[in-house]
């Protein structure tokens, strides 16, 4: 069980560090997150909290449950990140709708499903690449992060099963 706890604690720390880095970019570099970026942050926060719960509650019966739940959350986050990558690299910016109202306003005035559909459609602000690391934009890094989290989740599961 120690392998299980340490592994999931490491995943939680990774998720927390992605959020801290996103807040650093927002506060010090003055990068405003678009709605898709906010959804990716929610994905990392959810994955991190669930991974922390998996570390805190390592019941033998739950060792099959946690990887499945974490994989579903990771796939949702990766899907949002993949859509963001597609908007940035593969869709002509002139075909994107202009910047609409903020996410807070949309969540207050529209049903959740309509907000989610509107956010995934993308806006002009989602197609802008403001910052990159090694030539990769933040959504590409988020996609790699979610993919790595999913792989690490199953790696922890099989690593723990061998013990």
Image (cartoon, rainbow, N blue to C red):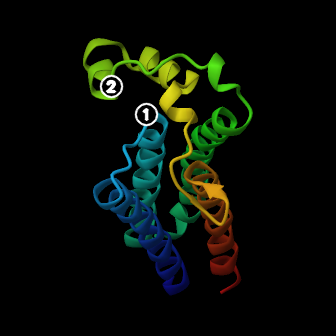
User: Which sits in the foreground, 24 or 118?
Assistant: 24
Q: Which numbered disc flags the more N-terminal residue, 2 or 1? A: 1
Q: How many marks?
A: 2
Residue for point 63% across, 26% down: 93
User: Which sits in the foreground, 88 or 63?
Assistant: 88
Q: Is residue 101 left or right of residue 18?
A: left
Circle 1 SS class: helix
Residue 50, quarter of picture = bottom left
Against 107, residue 87 (above or below) is below
Against 149, residue 160 (above or below) is below
Residue 145 location (% of width, % of height):
59, 60
Residue for point 38% across, 58% down: 25
The 10 Å Cα crowd at callout 2, few under 14, some 14 to 19, many 20 or more, is: few
Residue for point 61% across, 65% down: 153
User: Which sits in the foreground, 69 or 152?
Assistant: 152
Residue for point 48% across, 45% down: 40
Q: Which mark is residue 70?
A: none
Q: Which residue is mark 1?
A: 35
Q: Is residue 4 left or right of residue 112?
A: right
Against 63, residue 163 (above or below) is below
Against 153, residue 2 (above or below) is below
The 10 Å Cα crowd at callout 1, few under 14, some 14 to 19, many 20 or more, is: many
Residue 66 location (% of width, % of height):
53, 58
Q: Is residue 3 left or right of residue 111?
A: right
Q: CA distance from mark 2 to mark 1?
A: 8 Å
Q: Which residue is mark 2?
A: 102
Residue 117 location (% of width, % of height):
52, 19
């Amino acid at each position: 069980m120690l392998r299980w706890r340490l592994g999931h604690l490491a995943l939680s720390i990774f998720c927390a560090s992605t959020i801290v880095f996103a807040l650093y970019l927002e506060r010090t570099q003055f990068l405003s997150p678009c709605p898709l970026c906010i959804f990716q942050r929610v994905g990392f926060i959810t994955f991190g909290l669930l991974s922390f719960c998996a570390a805190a509650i390592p019941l033998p019966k739950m060792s099959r449950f946690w990887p499945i739940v974490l994989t579903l959350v990771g796939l949702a986050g990766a899907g949002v990140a993949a859509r963001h990558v597609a908007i940035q690299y593969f869709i002509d910016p002139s075909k994107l709708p202009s910047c609409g109202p903020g996410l807070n306003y949309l969540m207050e005035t529209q049903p959740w499903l309509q907000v989610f559909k509107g956010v995934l459609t993308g806006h002009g602000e989602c197609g802008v690449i403001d910052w990159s690391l090694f030539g990769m934009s933040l959504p590409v890094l988020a996609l790699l992060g979610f993919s790595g989290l999913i792989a690490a989740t199953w790696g922890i599961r099989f690593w723990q099963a061998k013990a």
